[in-house]
Image (cartoon, grey):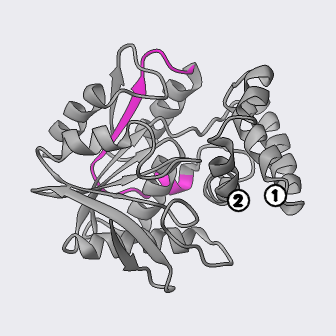
Amino acid sequence: MNTLKSKDGTTIAFDKAGGGPAVILVDGAMTSRSDGSKPELARLLAEHLTVYTYDRRGRGDSADTKPYAVEREIEDIDALISEAGGSAFLYGHSSGGCLAMDAAVALGDKRVRKLAMYEAPYNDDPAAQKIYREYIHNLTDALGSNRRGDAVALFMALVGTPAEQIEGMRHAPFWASMEMIAPTLAYDHTAIMGKDGSIPKELAARVRVPTLLIVGGSGAPFMLETAKTLRELIPGAELHTLDGQTHNVQPDVIAPVLVEFFA
């Protein structure tokens, strides 16, 4: 594990592997650099690229500094880009793709050379936005009352986890670690994605780097519709569908697509 200091002094933990052009992997909600399939994806990419995986602030081995602002997370990415030599590719999964797009716009094409996003979960459906606004209201209340377990449960319900499964998860050993990073749900879902989760059309139209939008062929239908809208908004953006993949994309399926795009 390596660490660096972001602009505001926050310690950011990261790992580095491989060789070649640099790519920074940006996590979505409730994940860190060592979770799930992330180490395997990093290993596969490291055969062709220099891969930086990091814990976003408030997660894993990284620190946190209040008050939170999206700009501080962009500064974290900028610090990693400096560590990588001054320019890098960005790959963001889920709401990490939303943050990566924010960073691409803010930092420009000298710092961010290319952008890849897998299933950024914006949704322009009015019914979905109503549900999202209710989620944000309840999430804010739960975190304000320090009911971190309830905050995690709200998130799990939002992504479609059955109530009985959520109840079972509450008694699992990993639940405590999820509660620890529960406050970061507000970072992703209130600050980065906005209070209704709609597609940020003006922001997307300002992206000026080559962009690849990726979706799973077996995922939620709205993800494809969102990607199609982003393709129309982002100048020159490409759209790639991975047959048979869901939101939890398999590393051996997406890695070749990313390598081809970045290399």
Find numbered disc 1 in the image and state the secondary structure of the residue it sits on: helix
Q: Give the range drawn in magenta.
A: 202-220
The quarter holding residue 16 reads bottom left
Residue 259, position in %: x, y? 18, 40
The quarter holding residue 140 reads bottom right
Residue 2, position in %: x, y? 32, 70
* Residue 90 sits inside the magenta stretch: no
* Tag 1 and tag 2, C-beta contact below 8 Å: yes
Give the residue drawn at x 27%, y 45%. Answer: 42
**Can you say whether 103 is above or below 155 in the image?**
below
The quarter holding residue 20 reads bottom left
* Residue 216 sits inside the magenta stretch: yes
Q: Hey, what amino acid is under mark 1?
A: Leu
Residue that mark 1 sits on = 143
Image check: 191 left or right of 43?
right
Image check: 163 left or right of 182?
right
Residue that mark 2 sits on = 183
* Nearest the eye: 2 or 154: 2
Q: CA–CA distance between discs 1 and 2? A: 7 Å
Find numbered disc 2 in the image and state the secondary structure of the residue it sits on: loop
